[in-house]
């Protein structure tokens, strides 16, 4: 019997991270013998994910929840990655990591990060970055200028805004970046103006119009947008201190729930929880508050991947949540991805493993998070499925590499984005 292998690595080029895609597998089914049953892709994927989770150690599952930093730069051959029998969920790049004006240098860097794990048949990590625009732009040397969200809303039409975000997202895709921690989907008010400055699109109407334009055009690519931050921010910088929203539930619905609830493709994106306390719900930082997360999901219908903000920030440590406690509280709260500005993920896993393995409820929450993460990694092509086989299986050994065709495509999107920027200056 002839073996037909379909790898999902190629599908994401056409469908991106859309979890609602429909795959026509009839042509492949027709090539099978008449005795072989048709494949229900969705059920098969669920079954394979469950088998994978059952085969994983608790350490490897906890590691999949971690979004960490990386030692090394695109201009250096001295890149150090901590490695064990399991891989972290993903890596967050900062400006010092990608301080290069050369496409090939950055692409080789992101390829190296992934291949270090997939070459050992481990689950591919994703690569994430903050690419909001304005001052929050780690790729200033290699990408054309992307204005701040405020500038976009003031000077670009909605169509032009959608186009420039699409072009930039395609360039991220070609650089090997899988997640963009953007947009800032917060309404600008007197209570957060000093902190957000120009990082918001503006009032409720502009946040709705331009936020939807950005999110929709990012998900047209293979990049996952991460809306931030719920419930929002105050003028207190959570990098250095505690932030509290004292608004009534009515105000919360109008100013803080609405921007997320009204996103048309809400569950095709992800959401980042901030450290800000939503006092009307619970006197606890939102990113580690089970009550606040349940409140958010109930009011918005959100069911996508949920990220914490960086758990090493002082808003948590000053509020009595050092890193270990914050990680355990975050898992308990029901988040999927835990962001930490650290590089040694093995040490992080070892610090919490004993607490988690003694708590069946925490183990269930870890399993649920890993299920959702693997589901997204399959949809985005980081993990493949051998779809037609006597024993279908997940495929982890994809090797990423530079190609001239990708660089040419990158250059094409660069020119389009630069032209849009120059026409709207």
Image: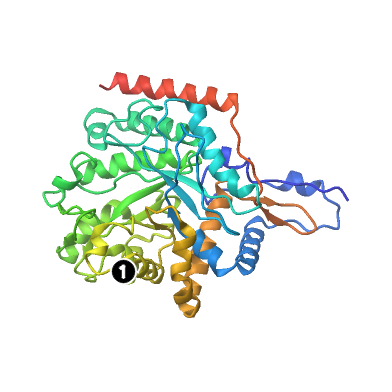
Q: What residue sits 31% from the left and 33% below the top?
A: 158
Please give left or right for residue 383 compared with residue 231 in the image: right
Please give left or right for residue 308 compared with residue 223 in the image: left
Q: Badge 1: few (under 14), some or many (20 or more) residues near its Cα, within 10 Å?
A: many
Please give left or right for residue 319 compared with residue 261 in the image: left
Q: What residue sits 27% from the left and 60% below the top?
A: 275
Residue 20 x %, y %: 53, 51
- Please state, as top left, top right, bottom left or bottom right, where the C terminus lies in the image: top left
- Image position of 53 with respect to 362: above or below: above
Q: Nearer the viewer, residue 80 or 321?
A: 80
Quadrant housing residue 183: top left
Q: Is residue 262 visible?
A: no
Q: What residue sits 50% from the left and 30% below the top?
A: 105
Q: Nearer the viewer, residue 218 or 409?
A: 409
Residue positioned most to the front: 78
Residue positioned most to the right: 1
The colour scheme used to paint the residues is rainbow
The residue that label 1 is drawn on is: 289
- Image position of 268 with respect to 55: above or below: above
Residue 27 x %, y %: 75, 44
Tag 1's secondary structure? loop
Q: Is residue 370 visible?
A: yes
Residue positioned most to the left: 190
Q: Nearer the viewer, residue 21 or 192?
A: 192
Residue 398 x %, y %: 65, 44
Number of on-image labels: 1
Residue 121 x %, y %: 66, 52
């Amino acid at each position: 019997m002839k073996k037909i292998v379909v790898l999902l690595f190629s599908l994401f080029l056409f469908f991106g991270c859309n979890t609602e895609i429909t795959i026509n597998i009839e042509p492949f089914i027709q090539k099978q013998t008449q005795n072989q049953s048709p494949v229900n892709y969705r059920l098969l994927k669920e079954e394979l994910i469950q088998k994978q989770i059952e085969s994983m150690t608790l350490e490897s599952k906890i590691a999949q929840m971690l979004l960490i930093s990386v030692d090394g730069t695109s201009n250096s051959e001295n890149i150090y990655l901590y490695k064990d029998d399991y891989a972290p969920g993903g890596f967050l790049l900062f400006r010092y990591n990608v301080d290069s004006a050369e496409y090939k240098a950055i692409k080789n860097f992101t390829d190296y990060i992934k291949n270090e794990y997939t070459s050992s048949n481990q689950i591919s990590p994703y690569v994430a970055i903050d690419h909001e625009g304005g001052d929050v732009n780690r790729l200033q040397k290699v990408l054309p200028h992307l204005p701040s969200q405020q500038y976009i809303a003031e000077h670009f039409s909605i169509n032009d805004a959608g186009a420039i975000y699409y072009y930039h997202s395609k360039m991220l895709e070609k650089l090997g970046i899988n997640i963009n921690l953007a947009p800032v989907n917060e309404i600008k008010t007197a209570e957060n103006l000093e902190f957000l400055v120009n990082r918001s699109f503006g009032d409720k109407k502009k946040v709705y119009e331009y936020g939807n334009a950005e999110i929709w055009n990012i998900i047209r690519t293979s990049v996952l947008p991460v809306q931030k931050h719920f419930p929002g921010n105050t003028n207190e910088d959570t990098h250095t201190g505690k932030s509290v929203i004292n608004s009534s539930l009515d105000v919360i619905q109008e100013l803080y729930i609405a921007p997320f609830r009204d996103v048309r493709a809400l569950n095709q994106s992800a959401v980042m929880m901030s450290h800000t306390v939503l006092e009307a719900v619970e006197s606890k930082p939102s990113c580690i508050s089970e009550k606040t997360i349940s409140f958010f999901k109930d009011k918005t219908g959100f069911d996508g991947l949920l990220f914490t903000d960086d758990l090493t920030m002082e808003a948590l440590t000053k509020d009595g949540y050092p890193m270990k406690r914050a990680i355990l509280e975050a898992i308990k709260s029901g988040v999927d991805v835990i962001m930490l500005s650290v590089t040694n993920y093995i040490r992080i896993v070892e610090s919490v493993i004993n607490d988690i393995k003694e708590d069946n409820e925490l183990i269930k929450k870890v399993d649920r998070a890993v299920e959702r993460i693997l589901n997204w990694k399959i949809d985005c092509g980081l993990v493949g499925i051998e779809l037609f086989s006597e024993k279908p299986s997940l495929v982890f050994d994809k090797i990423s590499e530079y190609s001239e065709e990708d660089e040419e495509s990158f250059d094409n999107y660069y020119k389009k984005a630069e032209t849009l920027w120059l026409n709207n200056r």
